[in-house]
Image (tube, grey):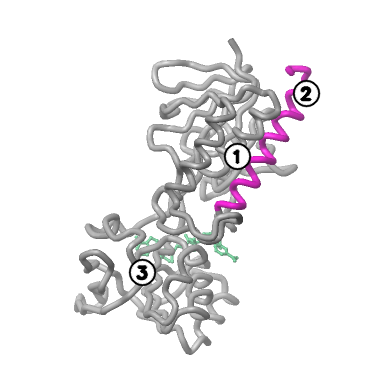
Amino acid sequence: MVEKVIIIGSGPSGYTAAIYAVRDGLAPLLIRGSLPGGQLMLTSAVENYPGFTSILGPDLMDDFYKHANNLGCRILDEDVTEVNLRTYPYKILAGKNEYKTYSIIIASGANAKWLGLANETRLLGKGISGCAVCDGVFFKNKDVIVVGGGDSAMEDASYLSRLVKSVTIIHRRKTFRASKIMQDRVLSNPKIKIIWESEIVDIMGKDRISGVKIKNLVTNNEKDMPIDGLFIAIGHSPNTELFKGQLDMDKQGYIKTHDFTSTSKEGVFAAGDVQDTIYKQAVIAAGWGSMAAIDARKFLADKKLI
Ligand code: NAP
């Protein structure tokens, strides 16, 4: 049997692609991995997804799942371990089974990079966040830290400075790598303070973050700083390992798309954070998922495969 379309990934883009493809009669197979749900599984309240004034990230993803499942989408909870785009139909290995397919929608997402500190995971969503646009509003009139020296850190610090009492950027070197215009915006903002050549070595807090220990990398001196919020902005890694050498990617490993969701291989489409280097928002990922499903249907129809 050859599948018409296999969707890899189960964040907002994967589920939305599945919902569109089922309703289009494509009988998609959604391979959602052994840890389904994507990055929203790690967030607390989501208040910027239209239609939901406030909903917990995992609950929103459960609603996405129920929507796809109720429509009759076939869903496989296995990790994809191999993809072969050198043969056609394409081949996908997931669990113990190999699947053949005429088209693929890659919606495997990206993961925010984290500092890797002991309390970081425990306090995620309890004062620690990887998304200023999503969570900034919960820190009105509070003191927050942003970690990083790239454009994301500059953008997050500038954005947060309009909401919070104070922003402190902690950066490990004495220059930012961010573009000049974004650096200038931060450097001239009186609400933003910068601690150079330093890193966070410990995070304190029982039920919520209460402070951090900061180490000066030049003097090795350490000091504690009380804090209400910690925003980690040290970059994202797209989940594209399976496609390396088979699809065109940028230097950070994001899949390159053209004509909206098309990739460098015919019949292979990419949607959501796996190809989005800028916005990284659930509602946008969902939109990309619907586009990929529509593009896959057009491809299959043009090839007279449906
Ligand atoms: P990035 O450019 O890779 O910067 C990551 C920053 O985090 C760097 O300053 C890096 O320090 C620091 N860092 C990395 N690992 C760290 C660790 N373990 N501990 C402490 N610091 C760490 O990532 P990004 O800022 O997310 O930007 C990614 C891409 O998106 C870039 O091409 C950027 O231009 C683009 N972007 C554009 C916009 C915009 O134009 N509006 C907004 C956001 C992002 P070092 O500098 O020492 O390596």
Q: From the viewer's perspective, is 148 left or right of 72?
A: left
Q: Amino acid at mark 2?
A: Ala
Image x and y of residue 135, in percent: 46, 65
Identify the residue at image location x=49%, y=26%. Answer: 75
Asked whether disc 2 touches disc 3, contact meaning CB atoms under 8 Å apart, the reply is no
* Among numbered discs 3 and 1, the one appearing first in the sequence: 1
Q: What secondary structure is found at the residue carrying circle 1? A: helix
Identify the residue at image location x=56%, y=26%. Answer: 73
Residue 297 sits inside the magenta stretch: yes
Q: What secondary structure is found at the residue carrying circle 3? A: strand
Magenta span main SS = helix
Q: CA distance from mark 3 to mark 1?
A: 31 Å
Q: What secondary structure is found at the residue carrying circle 2? A: helix
Image x and y of residue 169, in percent: 40, 76
Residue located beneath label 3 in the image: 230
Residue stretch in magenta: 282-306
How many other residues sit within 10 Å of disc 1, few (<14), some (14-19) or many (≥20)? many
Image x and y of residue 101, in percent: 60, 19
Asked whether disc 2 touches disc 1, contact meaning CB atoms under 8 Å apart, the reply is no
Q: Amino acid at mark 1?
A: Thr
Residue located beneath label 1 in the image: 16
- Please, is residue 99 above or below residue 259 in the view? above
Q: From the viewer's perspective, is 286 left or right of 127?
A: right
- Please, is residue 128 above or below residue 66 in the view? below
Residue located beneath label 2 in the image: 301
